[in-house]
Amino acid sequence: GYTYAWIRSGCSGGNAGREYTSAMVQFLNAIRSGLDEAERRLWCSSKAQLIPKPGGAGLRPLNILSSLHRIYNRLMNSRVAYMVGQRLAPLQLAVGIPNGAEIAAAAVEACLERGLDVIKLDMENGFGLIPRRLIYDRLRTYCPQLLEYFATTHGERSKAFLPNGFQLGWCSRGVRQGDPLAGLFYAIGTFDTNVKARDRLFDHISRLVGEGEGRMALAFADDTSFALPPAANGANEAN
């Protein structure tokens, strides 16, 4: 398929570059207008890549989409990320929040320095296991602009190929971690669950130690942290 370097060279200056850029815009607009079944299967096919996790903790599967698909999804993400981020913040910091990872890490560090207890949750293979129907339903509320496109790209299974062209299998659940929209889709799909977990935990803490400060909840993609007063743990153990 087309590489980023090839696309970049085609969009260079001069008449040829302008004609190429115009053709590229027309192509991407055609994608937005809708795909037939054969076009959808080709558009959604991906290259499977197994990436070692840090510390030798196994392999992380990546489904890498074509360069054109990733460019299109980057454009879509740039148009909606800020709007979605404003709806998910301050609980979820992975969408539309500049330096969201650094903010989340600093907030957790500040809680620890204050002597708060911190519960950290990391969803194992969260991107690969989140139900697609759940994301679709949440998109109705948080980003209806992407509802139809999500149905096109995730409504049915798609082929996953090895770099040598051999079909490894099918991508039929979750979101593709090599997709520029994967983080947004995952954050939207899990947001209501994180809200419920936060509210129930904070309500439990309030019953144990009363209302007050010293509690925090935030997430960055599939990493979620809850901070609570040390007295809450002691009271819970006493009960």
Image (cartoon, grey):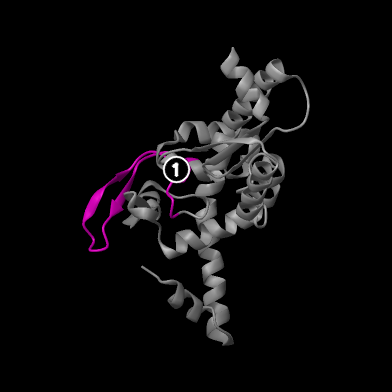
Judge by depth and name the residue closer to the eye, 18 or 81.
81
Q: Quadrant of the N terminus?
A: bottom left
The residue lying furthest to the bottom in this view is 14
The residue lying furthest to the right in this view is 212
Query: Is the residue 173 above or below the residue 54 in the image?
Result: above
The residue lying at 22 percent from left, 63 percent from top is 164
Query: Where, by quadrant of the figure, is residue 88 drawn?
Result: top right
Residue 129 is one of the magenta-drawn residues: no
Residue type (three-letter) at the residue carrying disc 1:
Phe
Q: How crowded is mark 1: few (under 14 residues within 10 Å), some or many (20 or more)?
A: many
Judged left or right of residue 174, residue 181 is right
Judged left or right of residue 13, residue 170 is left
The residue lying furthest to the top in this view is 239
Judged left or right of residue 30, residue 206 is right
Tell me, yes or no, if residue 210 can be seen here. Answer: yes
The residue lying at 56 percent from left, 46 percent from top is 184
Query: Is the residue 219 above or below the residue 59 in the image?
Result: above
Query: Where, by quadrant of the figure, is residue 148 drawn?
Result: top right
Judge by depth and name the residue closer to the eye, 70 or 205.
205
Residue identified by numbered label 1: 127
What range is drawn magenta here? 151-178
Query: Where, by quadrant of the figure, is residue 190 drawn?
Result: top right
Residue 156 is one of the magenta-drawn residues: yes
Judge by depth and name the residue closer to the eye, 109 or 129.
109
Query: Is the residue 58 above or below the residue 26 in the image?
Result: above
